[in-house]
Amino acid sequence: MKIRQAVLLCGGEGTRLRPYTYTMSKQMIPILGHPLTEWNIVQFKKHGITDFLINLYTKPEVMRDYLGDGSKWGVRITYNLESAPPGVAGSVKLFEKYADDEFFVIYGDTLSLADYSKMEQAWRSKPAAAIGMQRTQKTDDYQDADVAELDADGKFIAIHPKPHDRAYPNAHRMRGIFILKKKILSYIPAGRYYEIGRDLLPDVIGRGEPFYSYECGDYSKGIDTVEKWREAEKYLVDRGISYENFAKA
């Protein structure tokens, strides 16, 4: 069955994007005139994703007023307003009753042009027992990042949080796009602050649950500073990508 659902994680405060985030969440900053979240919805829609789960925390009314129920884009949006940040994994856990058996997850401050159909195709090639998959990037330069250590088949065998005092074989930066099975939510404790990289993945790996890597060269950019915001817009402009031709593609 094709994946039809995505969780957009939109609870971050965006302190490094102030003063812009005094009036909107960082996921609503305009990329060439249209909110970042709108770009992500349109890109997912191109690949058959029509059901979106979005958590809210900072300036929630701005996103809800703009996106509404999603019908403008031919999709459905379900929101969850958080009273306090529960961590990334904790935010996904709060959608458990709405979750399909399989779904995408993306950090909402990421501008992604990923081919989600190809990502799902790669997911289908993994063993049936796999509980999830995360986009990664192989690198020897990871002093500023948490990394996953992989085996020869691309399965996660260890998570190494920064700072690092040694080198790891087959180390990959952990990037913010996932495919998860609903089963993984059962490992997230309710009512606790819980992160994906620091808490959830080390736990499921330690329990022997197969979790895999996905590598691709598709463009994505985490936008948590003004400099990265401008870099993302420049990338689009330099390639002749406007929102209008992007949305029609």
Image (spheres, grey):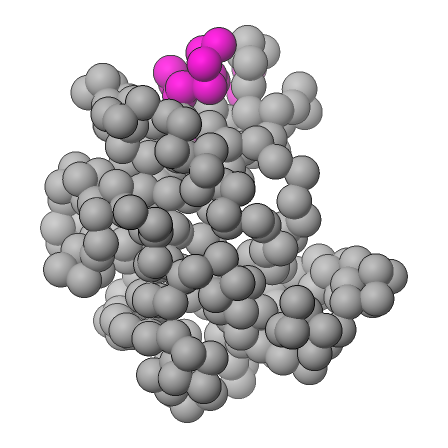
Q: Nearer the viewer, residue 66 or 11?
A: 66
Dividing the picture into quadrants, the one containing residue 181 is top left
Q: Nearer the viewer, residue 151 or 101?
A: 101
Q: Is residue 14 visible?
A: no
Q: Residue furthest front?
A: 1
Residue plotted at (50% across, 47% down): 117
Dividing the picture into quadrants, the one containing residue 216 is top right
Q: Is residue 164 magenta?
A: yes
Residue plotted at (50% across, 27% down): 147
Instruction: Indicate the position of residue 116 as horizontal and vertical percent values.
Output: 50, 49
Q: Is residue 153 magenta?
A: yes
Taking 149 as reference, is 90 left or right? left
Q: Magenta residues, as a range?
A: 149-165
Instruction: Indicate the position of residue 204 as horizontal and vertical percent values.
Output: 24, 27
Taking 234 as reference, is 24 left or right? left
Q: Is residue 10 visible?
A: yes
Q: Residue furthest bottom?
A: 65
